Amino acid sequence: MKKKFILLVALFVMFIPTIILADGGSPEYAPYEAFVSNKDGASLYYYDYDSDEYKKSSIKLKFNDQVRITYENQVTDDITYGRIVYSVNNNDEDEEDDDYFINLAYVSPIKEVYTLDDLKKAFTEDEEEDFIYGYMDDVLDENKVILAEDTYLRKGPSFKYEKLDNPIKKEVVVNKKAEVGRWIYIESEEASGWVDNNDDVVMEKTRDSLWLLEDIETYSTPYLTKKTDVVIHKNEKFGEVYRYDHYEANEDDTKDIRSYRVVYNDNIYYVNLEEKLHAFSVENDHDKKIVLPLDTDGYDEIDGKVIGEVPENTIVEVKYHAENEELLPSNKNEEHKNEWLYIEYNGKGYWVSENGRINNYFKFGTYSEYELITIDDIDGSDYIKDDSVITIPANTILKKYYESDGTYYYIEYKNKWYWVSLYDGYGYNMNYNGEETEYGEYEPEKELVLYNKPNGEKTGETIPENVTVELMFEYVDEKNEEDWEDDVYWYYVKYKDKEGWITEKEADVAEVKEESIKRKEASEGKTADYKDRLSKKDKEPDVVKPTKKLSTKDKMVLYTSLSIIFALFIFIFIYAYNNKKKLKNKKEEVKVEEPIKEENVEDEPTEETIDTETQEDKEDKKE
């Protein structure tokens, strides 16, 4: 009985994380309008988390009733449900809408064709909802793609939309215009439409060039199932490279397949790069230019022979970046994560590395044109961590620089380059998207007092109320790393010939601060109610901050911990109970029955009787 009970508790502990994972979030989807096309109507279902089933509700929609499908979920081979938001009592404004599900066999899209403009409109309408996640720039993700098989596009992002008459042929390069969830919008000369990426037919361009650094076997299909006799030798380079991702799940195994399509001797092959050293071309401007803070050896190949040297403070262009760094010979016995780059200097190509430069100060500096502003006077030196040769004043705008490790920067100041430390912080450009647009603007409702720097002194200048003020930079004075509500936001502003810093405490900049917090949280992958992050002063009165919901991971940790504690408690209880029972049995065994006495005979107690009684007394005391 005890073993069965402990086993039951153990199963309970292991089962709880599975329950929590079942509520791991909804898939992303492009919402579309539909109507009930079944003449007998369609019942709505709700999801029962206890039984992990969709159960029929008492609500039934009529023929021609309109619904908005926010995502689809195929629950069996024959049944696919669509989520809708439905209000039980449409006359009650305070009534919350509930999530219901409808069998998609009983509905049809209102529009026969769902275009790219429809997606943009739906995104705009639902940007405050959870139907589409991320930013529109992420959704409108243009790239080149190739289909692995002949594929029929659909007229909309759902299986409810009809297929086009003619398929897109495999191995034809077409243009991807948008991607939301599992659906990709494709344009070609022949047709435009939607393809389900879960069908594992889309190969997307990943790099302009691939450089193989080891011999590699080839396959005839992207599924890596049929090998060919062709072996591509090291140092071969290829043009546009397309990546294929395939997800395969079954009861015994879960396997991810990632292959790359290359053209070699006018033939198409597929290679597996997961365990082969290779290099991809560098195409991002941020990573293309670097500065070498120290004299750097140039190698003929990775971990090869030194064939030259690049002097310190040299700005070079990166052509290739080596992948699978854990395979590098010089990195196997080092904790420092090595990085090898192929650069060009004085007309020659070299492999260079940060090998041995464990000190973070000596990292390669990557290029940026995202403007910063200094908040204090800083020292500038000709070489990294060298003596100061110039003082760069506070409120200097840095337009071009190289970031070495988040602390040391190689900056341009008055047409010369210097190494500076921005350890004490700096102000960020107010262009949230990093684009060349106008700075943020707002109209203060009261007079602004200008400061010479954050937490500094007043300059004596003011900016009048109800004028248009440029918000150029922001600086966050982090008071508490655990709680952003304690942060103080400073803004560098400009009005005509007046410039200076203002603080959120002296200006009504709640909307600006809200956008700042939104950007900061988005950069860390968090989702939150941004208005709840504002200080109480910025909030409207009578607004109650909702209780923060635990994430799926937090729920798993919490419930698993509670289950373990509960199991330990039961174990200790059973152990204590059994121990007490053993003591009781031992006491009964030790007891000796008293001898039968003859009548009218008074015997003196023997030594054995005395010892027994003494032992019983001891047992009683122990109990």
Image (tube, rainbow, N blue to C red):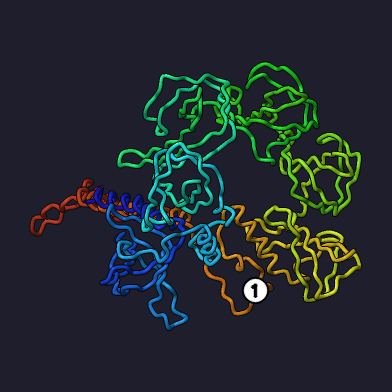
On the image, which quarter does residue 453 sit in? Answer: bottom right
Q: Position of residue 29 (x, y in %)?
A: 45, 57
Q: Position of residue 186 (x, y in %)?
A: 49, 49
For the point 73% across and 63% down, the residue is: 488
Q: Say whether residue 422 is left or right of residue 529.
A: right
For the point 55% across and 30% down, the residue is: 324
Q: Say whether residue 383 is left or right of residue 554.
A: right
**View extreme (bottom): residue:** 91
Label 1 sits on what residue type?
A: Lys
Compared to residue 214, the image places residue 558 above or below, namely: below
Residue pointed to by mark 1: 539
Q: Position of residue 134 (x, y in %)?
A: 55, 56
Disc 1 is placed on an element classified as loop
Within-10-Å neighbours for mark 1: few <14, some 14–19, many 20+: some
In the image, 8 versus 135, the foreground residue is 135
On the image, which quarter does residue 516 sit in? Answer: bottom right
On the image, which quarter does residue 208 sit in? Answer: top right
For the point 52% across and 19% down, the residue is: 233
Q: Is residue 423 visible?
A: yes
Q: Is residue 619 visible?
A: no
Q: Say whether residue 502 is left or right of residue 391.
A: left
- Quarter of the picture containing the C terminus is bottom left
For the point 34% across and 64% down, the residue is: 47
Compared to residue 60, the image places residue 278 above or below, namely: above
In the image, 205 versus 96, the foreground residue is 205
Q: Position of residue 167 (x, y in %)?
A: 40, 45
In the image, 262 versus 341, the foreground residue is 262
